[in-house]
Amino acid sequence: MNFGLFIKQRKCYTPQLKSFRTYSKIMKTFLTIYITAAICIVSTAGHGHRHYNGWHGNRYSHSHGSGWSSGSTGWTSPSPPDTGDTRSLDQLYRLALAEGGNLIVYAGGDSAGQMDEIKAAFESRFPNIKAEMIVDFSKNHDVRIDRQLSEGKLIPDVTHLSSVHDFPRWKKEGVLLQYKPAGWDQVHPEFKDADGFFTGLVVVAFSNNINRDLLGNNSATWPTEANDYLRPSLKGKIVSEYPQEDDVALFWFKKVVDKYGWSWLQKFVANNPTFVRGAQIPSEMVWDGVSSATFTTDGMMKPKETYPVQFVLPKADPFVSFAQLGAIFKNAKHPAAAKLYLSWRLSYEMQNDVWYMWSVRKDVPVPEGYKGIFNYKGQTDPREFAEWMEDRAAVERFRTQVTLIVGEMVGPSPPGNLGPYPAKALQH
């Protein structure tokens, strides 16, 4: 799945999308400046992260102390607070250099270049580290990792995926390294394994992306609720990821079908949306003005208003949110570099200055105009996705039921064919 990565490299899906190339150049320039500023801050911070007065304490109206503690999920009850790794990023960097200065990451995503800006930022901050960011759908990476583990041919040091059900299983199988990165004490307990085997890196939400040029600037007329997408005026103007492609998109459809019934999906398909593979292409099509709106991708919450595409949450209907999880493998060839990478990804600067949705950290402010992610009662709870993902038989039954209405997916896989043992990103 996509979950955008504001720092991702968006690419045109057809040669005709010339205006989107212009947008990509502008956005890439902006991101380069944005990430460079964040790198400078991190470089000057004494321990790679800083204490920010005014953002600690309770920012939500209820306690989060329970965590994801059900026996079915494999997550454990939160232990007393601890600070995680107390070494600075510079200290971790020196250890990574002594180890050889290499890192391999298997990242869940939708295109080979989706992690290019993260790679560039990491290698700029730590210039003698060589990082390979290998992107594929999470549903491909997890089975790839399982095969490599079974054959003793593990390639990645770190993985971060949306297939969140894999991490408790890998923990039980004893293949993950126990490590609490720097800033661990500031991560919401709901987003981390209390024993330190995995942690959330970013919070992602799939919801409405509206093209203002096509639908106007009057937000009262925008499609934000599920039934809005059934309007005759939007026939043939909506783009959606195939629900069966991606468990995140599938869960969005699950929540809507649970509320409105299968007739909603039948009416939606009858309204002639464009179905595509992956979550990145819907975003591209809306940004380029090919489609008016989508709800099967994430969007920019910072700044509050964006143009020509605005990300907007529904007023009452459900939407999907979750934390993408990351972990280091016990048999990683470059554990020191892996620890550096996770600590850097969780640093205040990366979470606040680069990521464009909610943070997994308690001390990072909620984007202006939004509530805390746990405060959308009846609409979303990031714990629900992980719980739903645990019952794989139920997930597959729903996927098959959806396919009967939507039809089989067509088109090539956007990330490409990486095979079972990729050690380098596909050329792009």
Image (tube, rainbow, N blue to C red):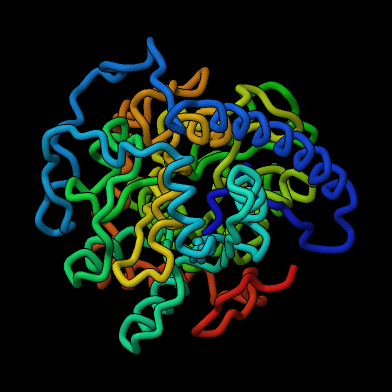
Picture coordinates of residue 179 (x, y %)?
Answer: 28, 52
Please name whichever residue, 219 or 151, is drawn nearer the observer in this view of the structure: 151
Q: Residue at x 23, y 50 (%)?
A: 196
Picture coordinates of residue 94 (x, y %)?
Answer: 48, 49
Please name whichever residue, 370 or 425, is drawn nearer the observer in this view of the structure: 425
Q: Residue at x 81, y 42 (%)?
A: 23
Dividing the picture into quadrants, the one containing residue 391 is: bottom left
Q: Which quarter of the image is occupied by the C terminus? A: bottom right
Q: Would residue 126 be found to the left or right of residue 389 on screen? A: right
Please name whichever residue, 337 or 301, is drawn nearer the observer in this view of the structure: 337
Q: Residue at x 66, y 43 (%)?
A: 293
Dividing the picture into quadrants, the one containing residue 203 is: top left
Q: Is residue 391 visible?
A: no
Is residue 178 placed above or below 86 in the rendered structure? below
Dividing the picture into quadrants, the one containing residue 71 is: bottom left
Is residue 59 placed above or below 16 in the rendered structure? above
Count numbered badges in the picture: 0
Please name whichever residue, 287 or 51, is drawn nearer the observer in this view of the structure: 51
Picture coordinates of residue 269 (x, y %)?
Answer: 56, 60
Q: Is residue 195 visible?
A: yes
Name, please, the residue furthest toward the bottom. 151
Picture coordinates of residue 397 (x, y %)?
Answer: 31, 72
